[in-house]
Amino acid sequence: MLDLAQVRSFLAVFESGSFSRAAAHLGIGQSTVSQHVRRLETYLQNRLFERDTHTVALTPAGEQLLPEARRMIEIAERVEGNFLSARLRGRIRFGLSEDLVSGTLPRILENFSREHPLVDLELTVALSETLFAQQKLGDVDLVLAKRRLGQTHGRCIARQELVWLARNPLELARKRPLPLVAFPPPSLTRSLALEALDGSSTPWRISCTCSSLSGLTAAARAGLGLFVQPRSLRPEGLEEVPKGLLPELEMVEFILVKRKGVDEAVSQALSEVILRQAALQL
């Protein structure tokens, strides 16, 4: 019979693009993931992945297995949710940094609602500093947001390099004053970008300000200016400015911050879903 643990490892390797990231996502060793995939290939008498030192790609047999594997895991998780997770009830107010909405949020919500269908989720999307302020007031229970290097509040789950992005990076990077599209204050990425430019005496102007990621992405795709984002969150249609044309940007850390007094079981359940997803995307 097919082993669901092996099927989960197969899916994790495909979705993350590597055996090491799949192991981090599943919380097991890389050797175990490799063993799962080998045993699944042996059982099915077909190679499922083509591997080299840099990439992992599905073979035709792997492509054929993929939709069936997803259905198997979906059924297993639905059964587990109905019999095991339905006991978890409650409500949690989740705050998420604006720049994580498009890439990370949908999978977090999908996985959490499937695993804990009786927990009510109240979502707030805002800039990191705004979320921290709301949490201090008791309006948000769990926050996933960014902090500067050197700050200590929250639990660090990933570190990312900030990059300059543009539709036409070579052209825009040479303009003076440098046109920027940015979140309004107190945006951390805005502050770090302006500090880097001021530190290098590079003249700049804010050509477009918007509080939503979709609005800023549209402005940057339209060529209005450069946009600063963590590398893993680069929107489609924007390219990095080659190194050396603009001052180097600091790194940022993604953190989880839990409010004191929050329902521990519900908070831990959501945190576990976030950590699994962060291992794949951040």
Image (cartoon, grey):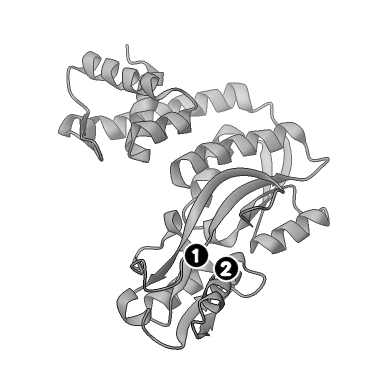
Callout 2, which amino acid?
A: Leu
Which residue lies under the disc numbered 2? Answer: 192
Looking at the image, do the residues carrying marks 1 and 2 touch, with CB atoms under 8 Å apart?
yes
- Tell me residue 186's x, y (percent): 67, 70
Q: Secondary structure at mark 2?
A: helix
Q: Is residue 1 above or below residue 49?
A: above
Among numbered discs 1 and 2, the one appearing first in the sequence: 2
Residue 43 in the image: x percent, y percent? 24, 14
Q: 280 or 80, which is in the foreground?
A: 280
Q: Image height check: is 9 above or below 193?
A: above
Q: Position of residue 88 (x, y in %)?
A: 69, 30
Query: Is residue 117 at all visible to an observer of this figure?
Result: no
Dot 1: within a 10 Å radius of its alpha carbon, few (fewer than 14), some, or many (20 or more) residues? some
Label of residue 211 in the image: none
Q: Quadrant of the N terminus?
A: top left
Q: Residues within 10 Å of mark 2 (few under 14, many from 20)?
A: some
| Residue at image coords 52%, 67% | 213
Residue 146 or 142: which is nearer the viewer? 146
**Does the image show residue 8?**
yes
The three-letter amino acid code for the residue at tag 1 is Leu
Of 153 and 140, nearer the camera is 153
Percent of width and height locating residue 281: 45, 46
Give the numbered dot on residue 249.
1
